[in-house]
Amino acid sequence: EYNPTSTKKQRFYNVENLSVSYAFNETYHKDYNVRKFIDQNVRASANYNFSFEQKSIEPFKNWESLNSKYLKLIKDFNLNLMPSTISINSNIIRSYNEQQSRDLIEIAGFSQLPVLKQRHFMFDWDYNIGYNLTKSLQFNFSAANHYIYDDFESSEDIQLMDNFFNLGRPDHYHQTLNGTYKIPLNKIPYLEFVNANYAYTADFDWQASSQS
């Protein structure tokens, strides 16, 4: 049993790092003008998050020969070989709508008005990796993916839960890389009062062409 106040070290494979959720909603309506109206929505999610314990390698930390203020930049050298955080999120989001109006004037030989159907079957997933390479240099990479399931004919009777785990085709992809660097000017003698930071951002975006 998981105890949130426990001091036991957390592992990346612990089940507590994973969360799942499911929600379903349905609306049914009919009246004088509407023979049948059905609106269904479902959302299923799975998420994983973990923060790694930071273990920096500081090879010169205990070298007394580097205690001079002129060698502080070398003495404070550090390197972290593990990522800081990892998160993965996935969502199946589906909606199904069906509507049929009544014939207000019935005419012999004419069939009922057609049933109108609308489907939005989507799958989204994204991941994020944070990496503090050193105490002064941090990176963050994130990517988001969007899929659409529409591999069926309009005449097919595809319901909300049909082929539920069929992800469909990729429709949109976006990724971002952020980097920040605290320039160690304050470790240089007589520049202790100076603080300088450098930030870098790179983006990539892809959109599928229209299927029409």
Image: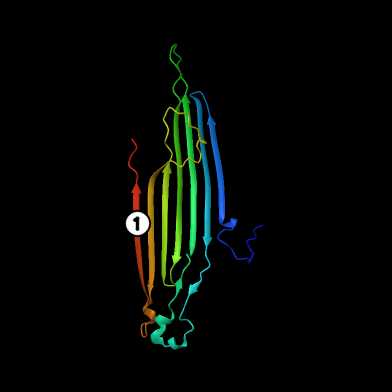
Q: How is the image coloured?
A: rainbow
Where does label 1 land, which residue?
Answer: 203
**What is the tally of numbered marks visible in this picture?**
1
Look at 44% across and 38% down and name the residue there. 120
Find residue 156 and report its horizontal and vertical position in percent. Answer: 45, 28
- Badge 1 element: strand
Closer-to-camera residue (59/156): 59
Residue closest to the eye, 151 or 190: 151
Residue projecting furthest to the top = 108
State whether residue 20 is above or below residue 116.
Answer: below
Q: Residues within 10 Å of mark 1 (few under 14, many from 20)?
A: few
Quadrant where the N terminus is found in the figure:
bottom right
Q: Where is residue 149? Give x, y as percent.
A: 43, 39
Q: Percent from the top left, x then y, of residue 128? A: 45, 57
Q: Quadrant of residue 133?
A: bottom left
Looking at the picture, tell me which residue is in the foreground, 15 or 174: 15
Q: Is residue 91 above or below residue 62?
A: above
Amino acid tagged 1: Asp
Say above or below: 126 vs 97: below
Q: Position of residue 13 (x, y in %)?
A: 57, 58
> Which of the image's four quarters has the C terminus?
top left
Which residue is farthest right?
A: 1
For the point 43% across and 14% down, the residue is: 110
Residue at 42% x, 88% y is 68
**Which residue shows up at 36% across the image and 66% down it?**
199
